């Protein structure tokens, strides 16, 4: 596979900081036009504009239209571009179904800190990503179980492990070009779902010890370690803490209640002013009082637009002018 033409485009305005990559790739039978996009520095969503290979002239036309569409929206070229794998298999269904977490209260978390049957890890603020290496190639898998490209640096670290020890699959969270691992599903070509989670995690730490792009998330086991982790993450304005049953097996999906993996997110709340109800949506635009600027006054009140908030299904949509309590991530 060979990328004949490649363009990287970037867009920054206000709170938006996005990147978009397009390329024409030569494959068996012709050429395909692939793309990747997302928040700059984060894991990118990948796809293709060609469901089947086309000749170069047609690929170039599709590619040119794609680039023109993005530049007309304000995207501009930038020389920075982290290397990613090709996207020829992007979007294909895999056999990966992630194990998902249910939320708990702070009271529950305090109880689990004291419970010797549970360990804790920092909840990483990235995008769910499993990585599977087999037969000399590495594949990323997202939260939906679809194949996605990995940063080349991650693939380059995973493939030598597979070459020496056999098929391997890790599960984790990707932030930029670092894959933070919190589980190991396949090792030496064998599924190890039935092993206790702590055993899988300790093995992952050993297997990945020499890696720089793939890192095992540290585990806090004792009450003292868990309490220290809790305080550290909260002080650093981290997203939260995950609690895991030490002898838990791999269980796909999310249970209706409880489960072997539980999460607590550090949040705050604020009283906000409903500036406008979004037409046709269960969401509202909210603002906060600002005593320094009268240019955005609402009913005589000086407001700063905060953003949009989705109203849960079991709550009535408030009216413009109402005061609502909004919970947001501590970070």
Image: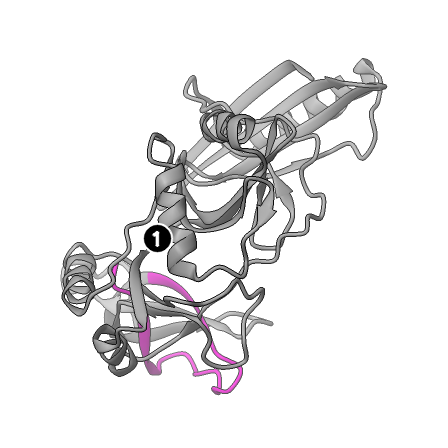
Relative placement, left or right, of 168 versus 109 is right
Give the secondary structure at mark 1: loop
Relative placement, left or right, of 269 versus 231 is right
**Residue drawn at the location 28% of the way across and 55% of the way down:** 219
Camera-side residue of 3 and 146: 146
Q: How many marks?
A: 1
| 243 shown above or below 256 | above
Residue 150 rendering spot, x and y as whole percentages: 53, 34
Query: Residue tagged by mark 1?
Result: 124
Residue 99 rendering spot, x and y as whole percentages: 52, 62
Q: Name the quadrant containing residue 324.
A: bottom left
Image quarter in which the C terminus is found = bottom left
Instruction: Please report the bounds of the magenta region as a residue range.
Output: 306-331
Camera-side residue of 93 and 221: 221
| 203 shown above or below 263 | above
Residue 297 rendering spot, x and y as whole percentages: 28, 66
Q: Is residue 299 visible?
A: no
**Residue drawn at the location 18% of the way across and 69% of the way down:** 223
Q: Is residue 42 visible?
A: yes
307 falls in the magenta region? yes
Residue 74 rendering spot, x and y as whole percentages: 50, 32
175 falls in the magenta region? no
């Amino acid at each position: 596979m060979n990328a004949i033409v490649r363009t990287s485009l970037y867009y920054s305005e206000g709170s938006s900081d996005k990147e978009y990559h397009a390329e024409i790739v030569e494959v068996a039978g012709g050429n395909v036009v692939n793309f990747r996009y997302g928040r700059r520095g984060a894991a990118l969503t990948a796809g293709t504009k060609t469901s089947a290979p086309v000749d170069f002239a047609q690929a170039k036309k599709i590619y040119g239209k794609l680039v023109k569409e993005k530049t007309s929206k304000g995207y501009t070229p930038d020389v920075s571009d982290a290397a990613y794998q090709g996207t020829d298999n992007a979007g294909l269904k895999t056999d990966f179904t992630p194990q998902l977490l249910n939320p708990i209260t702070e009271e529950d978390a305090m109880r689990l800190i004291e419970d010797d049957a549970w360990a804790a890890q920092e909840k990483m603020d990235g995008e769910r990503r499993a990585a599977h290496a087999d037969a000399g190639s590495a594949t990323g898998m997202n939260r939906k179980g679809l194949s996605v490209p990995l940063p080349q640096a991650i693939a380059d670290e995973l493939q030598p492990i597979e070459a020496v020890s056999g098929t391997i699959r890790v599960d984790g969270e990707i932030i930029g070009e670092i894959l933070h691992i919190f589980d190991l599903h396949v090792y030496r070509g064998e599924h190890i779902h039935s092993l206790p989670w702590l055993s899988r995690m300790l093995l992952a730490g050993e297997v990945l010890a020499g890696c720089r792009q793939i890192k095992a998330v540290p585990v806090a086991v004792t009450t003292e370690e868990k309490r220290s982790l809790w305080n550290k993450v909260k002080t650093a304005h981290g997203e939260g803490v995950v609690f895991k049953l030490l002898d838990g097996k791999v269980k796909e999906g999310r249970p209706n209640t409880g489960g072997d993996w539980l999460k607590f997110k550090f949040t705050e709340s604020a009283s906000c002013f409903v500036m406008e109800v979004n037409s046709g949506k269960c969401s509202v635009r909210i603002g906060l009082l600002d005593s320094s600027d009268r240019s955005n006054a609402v009913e005589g009140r000086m407001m700063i637009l905060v953003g949009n908030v989705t109203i849960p299904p079991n709550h009535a949509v408030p009216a413009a002018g109402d005061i609502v309590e909004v919970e947001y991530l501590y970070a």
